[in-house]
Image: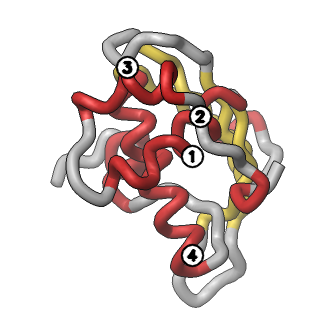
Amino acid sequence: MSIQQLQPANQQELRVYLPYFQGNKRNILPLAISLFKKGVMEGQRRIEGADGIPFIATWNISTLPADLIRCRLQFDNNAELSYELLMQSSEYIDHLIDVILNFQRSRSTDFSKPFYRKLLRIEE
């Protein structure tokens, strides 16, 4: 499923997450919740000066913002290039908001640099 095909989440789902987001992120939140409920996303990590690396991200779905979810990214369809991390669902939805905003700007489905730093456990 493409980000363009997402339908906004309903008001009941939205209400639970609203206190966790401010400003412009609230405008994207209904689409981010909808993407979160899919539990899977395919994209491509852009590499400067090279071809992008395809990935598939999967995660467990929860209904509460404070629930921990496990996100797994597998790059280039290679099990040896798999990474996992745990975070609260509200934090992960925040990263999905960034994915949607990035898609709206560049038509590319990819996570933000802060997400990859967290995934690879790189300190800022």
Dots 3 and 2: beta carbons under 8 Å?
Answer: no
**Disc 4 or 3, which lies upstream in sequence?**
3
Q: Which residue is mark 3?
A: 16
Between circles 4 and 1, the one closer to the viewer is 1
Dots 4 and 3: beta carbons under 8 Å?
Answer: no
Kindly state the secondary structure of the residue where label 4 is placed: loop
Dots 4 and 1: beta carbons under 8 Å?
Answer: no
61 w.r.t. 44: above or below = above
Report x, y in % for residue 32. Answer: 53, 43
- Mark 4 crowd level (few <14, some 14–19, many ≥20, 10 Å Cα): few
Mark-to-mark CA distance, 1 and 2: 6 Å
Between circles 4 and 3, the one closer to the viewer is 3
Dots 4 and 2: beta carbons under 8 Å?
Answer: no
Residue at 53 percent across and 12 percent down: it is 62
Report x, y in % for residue 24. Answer: 30, 59
10 w.r.t. 25: above or below = above
Three-letter code, disc 1: Leu
Three-letter code, disc 3: Val
Three-letter code, disc 4: Ile
Residue projecting furthest to the front: 11
Residue at 54 percent across and 59 percent down: it is 100
Q: Which residue is mark 4?
A: 47
Q: Which residue is mark 1?
A: 31
Dots 1 and 2: beta carbons under 8 Å?
Answer: yes
Name the mark on residue 9. Answer: 2
Apparent side of residue 122 relative to residue 28 in the rendered image (left or right): left
- Mark 3 crowd level (few <14, some 14–19, many ≥20, 10 Å Cα): few
